């Protein structure tokens, strides 16, 4: 729970609450570009510029967050905020990281719901889809270069892709299997699973960072602290879900949003890219919340606003309640649905940090844990590649059919339904992002303008 005495005295590291608030707000405002860009911003500001934490401590926190379900960048902010200013500092850092994106996505969702069928708006999102496809492919390349060190890791990524794309194996099972594989491999001393991540690097000693390398007093795990954190954050997360389910029933859209996104909160390993294909399939085919292609529109919003990409789930929750408002005005229902999806998505993130971080601080050189992390990261490359394939099929082709048999269940495009403008724009965006190293903001803007231009000249409807 929050230590109410910490505001009454200056922390030993000398970083005041006012300075911390300004720094976390600055990080939140600059948190574009997905987890890789957001983590890079945090590293530059917290490690290089402000020198709050050392390189080794930053990497240790990051590696724990990558093992967790949910957005690793937001969890990393919460972790370091907790290290610096206890629980209240973690709430401030994690909350500020989410706030700009939540406000932006809510506003864009309202505009989309009101005007999304208008030709100009639809044309802008037509262009955005091509840019988003390129950005997802870029994520495959970036993560792959970092994670696929050797044939074993390449094989893990390939098996993960085939398992989820061709056989519809649930990605939580894929991630869990890869983690167990890496854990056992590292315990056995296999070189492929022994990664050097810098946890034991003491070059960044106490003099290199304001926090230092010693274990802070509040980071010492104990039974009382564990039980307190569990009780508070589980209640904040699950009590609203239980109340909705009990009062509205399982068939109500708000109950469905609460339960579905609570489930997603515990299985979203690998960040937004790893889970969006599953969410899109469930939102379109399972619940009927979205129409085909609308998930790409939502991801385009998340790509162009600050905050975690998983904020796209707020868009899904908004559209679900907007289209099934019951007795509420559609816009109000949509807003409540979006806020509910956001609440049950991020409450568990605080639980994972405040419950696990004190124990993880004691595992800064654990070889088996690092082996599990390396294998999970490799499998996530295959999962993200599956997302890229799913997006490509549904962006470039107008018709898609599902092939089933012999354990296989996968979407296959109808070749004759290819959209030439979508193909051309996607190819141009991929070339710009991957080969010409164009920036994300510029690519998104250019593709949006290209979609608008195609609409104005009558090339697309």
Image (spheres, rainbow, N blue to C red):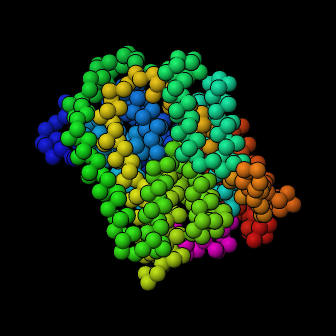
**Vertically, is 217 above or below 328?**
above
- Residue lying at the far right in this picture: please name it: 416
Q: Main secondary structure of the magenta part?
A: helix
Residue 156 placement: quadrant: top right
Please name whichever residue, 67 or 293, is drawn nearer the observer in this view of the structure. Answer: 67
The structure residue drawn at horizontal position 48% and vertical position 74%, both measured from the top left corner, is 251
Is residue 106 at all visible to an observer of this figure? no
Percent across and percent down for residue 286 are 60, 65
The structure residue drawn at horizontal position 45% and vertical position 41%, both measured from the top left corner, is 68
Is residue 5 at all visible to an observer of this figure? yes
**Vertically, is 458 above or below 19?**
below
The structure residue drawn at horizontal position 46% and vertical position 45%, both measured from the top left corner, is 69
Percent across and percent down for residue 240 are 34, 64
Q: Is residue 434 magenta?
A: no
Please name whichever residue, 460 or 325, is drawn nearer the observer in this view of the structure. Answer: 325
Bounds of the magenta segment: 108-124
Q: How many marks?
A: 0
- Residue lying at the far front in this picture: please name it: 406
């Amino acid at each position: 729970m929050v230590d109410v005495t910490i505001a009454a005295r200056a922390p030993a590291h000398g970083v005041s609450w006012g300075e911390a608030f300004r720094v976390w707000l600055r990080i939140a405002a600059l948190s574009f570009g997905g987890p890789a860009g957001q983590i890079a911003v945090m590293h530059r500001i917290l490690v290089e510029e402000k020198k709050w934490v050392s390189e080794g401590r930053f990497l240790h926190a990051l590696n724990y967050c990558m093992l967790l379900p949910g957005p690793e960048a937001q969890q990393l902010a919460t972790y370091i905020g907790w290290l610096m200013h206890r629980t209240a500092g973690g709430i401030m850092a994690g909350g500020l990281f989410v706030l700009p994106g939540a406000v932006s996505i809510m506003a864009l969702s309202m505009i989309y719901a009101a005007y999304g069928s208008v030709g100009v708006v639809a044309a802008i999102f037509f262009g955005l889809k091509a840019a988003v496809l390129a950005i997802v492919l870029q994520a495959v390349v970036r993560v792959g270069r970092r994670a696929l060190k050797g044939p074993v890791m390449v094989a893990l990524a390939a098996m993960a892709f085939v398992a989820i794309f061709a056989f519809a194996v649930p990605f939580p099972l894929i991630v869990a299997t890869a983690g167990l594989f890496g854990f056992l491999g590292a315990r056995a001393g296999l070189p492929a699973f022994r990664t050097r991540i810098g946890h034991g690097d003491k070059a960044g000693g106490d003099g290199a960072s304001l926090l230092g390398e010693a274990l802070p007093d509040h980071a010492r795990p104990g039974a009382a602290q564990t039980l307190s954190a569990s009780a508070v954050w589980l209640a904040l997360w699950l009590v609203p879900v239980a109340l909705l389910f009990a009062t509205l029933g399982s068939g109500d859209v708000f109950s469905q949003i609460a339960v579905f996104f609570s489930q997603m909160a515990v299985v979203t390993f690998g960040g937004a890219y790893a889970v969006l294909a599953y969410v899109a399939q469930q939102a379109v085919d399972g619940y009927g919340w979205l129409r085909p292609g609308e998930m790409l529109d939502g991801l385009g919003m998340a790509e162009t606003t600050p905050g975690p990409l998983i904020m796209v789930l707020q868009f899904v929750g908004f559209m679900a309640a907007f289209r099934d408002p019951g007795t509420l005005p559609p816009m109000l229902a949509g807003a409540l649905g979006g806020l509910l999806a956001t609440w049950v998505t991020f409450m568990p993130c605080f639980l994972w940090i405040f419950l696990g971080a004190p124990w993880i601080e004691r595992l800064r050189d654990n070889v088996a844990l690092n082996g599990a992390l390396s294998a999970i990261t490799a499998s996530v490359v295959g999962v993200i590649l599956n997302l890229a394939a799913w997006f490509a099929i549904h962006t470039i082709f107008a018709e898609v059919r599902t092939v089933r048999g012999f354990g296989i269940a996968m979407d296959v495009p109808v070749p004759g339904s290819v959209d030439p403008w979508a193909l051309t724009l996607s190819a141009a965006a991929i070339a710009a992002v991957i080969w010409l190293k164009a920036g994300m903001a510029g690519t998104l803007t250019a593709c949006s303008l290209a979609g608008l231009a195609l609409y104005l000249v009558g090339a697309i409807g």
